[in-house]
Amino acid sequence: MSDHLHENCQALLGTLSEYIDGELPAELCREIEKHLEGCDNCRVVLNTTKRTIDLVRVPVDEDVPADIRERLFKRLNLDEYLNLKN
Ligand SMILES: [Zn+2]
């Protein structure tokens, strides 16, 4: 299958934090997992994001580099997926 679109990556990356938190509907989780199976890029980002979220959840702010936080928060604000859905 070669139906991989970069648009999907963008949308997916915007939902990663919710996906990791288990806040997405099962149907959407399945879509994401399907995409991850065929997309090394997104898998790498998922793993990185997971690790970053674990980091920022540690209640010791000094241990979290500011740029990592900033990048994560930017990612959390991505809402391309919602735009695609509407
Ligand atoms: Zn992808």
Image (tube, rainbow, N blue to C red):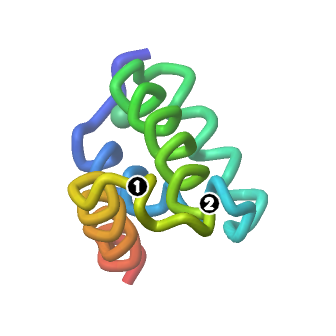
* Amino acid at pointer 1: Val
Q: Nearer the viewer, residue 47 or 13?
A: 47
* Amino acid at pointer 2: Val
Farthest residue toward the bottom?
Answer: 86
Judged from the image, the secondary structure of the residue bearing numbered disc 1 is loop
Q: Which mark is residue 4?
A: none
User: Can you identify the residue that label 2 sits on?
Assistant: 58
Image height of 43 relative to 69, above or below = above
- The image shows residue 62 at horizontal and vertical percentages of 41, 61
- The image shows residue 72 at horizontal and vertical percentages of 35, 60
- The image shows residue 34 at horizontal and vertical percentages of 60, 33
| Mark 2 CB lies closer than 8 A to ligand 1 | no
Residues at badges 2 and 1 in contact (C-beta under 8 Å)?
yes
Judged from the image, the secondary structure of the residue bearing numbered disc 2 is loop
State the separation of the CA atoms marked 2 and 1: 8 Å
| Mark 1 CB lies closer than 8 A to ligand 1 | no
- The image shows residue 16 at horizontal and vertical percentages of 50, 54
N-terminal of the pair, mark 2 or mark 1, is: 2
Q: Residues within 10 Å of mark 2 (few under 14, many from 20)?
A: few
- Residue at point 68% right, 52% down? 29
- Residue at point 35% right, 57% down? 11
Q: Nearer the viewer, residue 32 or 13?
A: 13
Q: Quadrant of the C terminus?
A: bottom left
| 37 relative position to 26: left or right | left
User: Can you identify the residue that label 1 sits on?
Assistant: 64
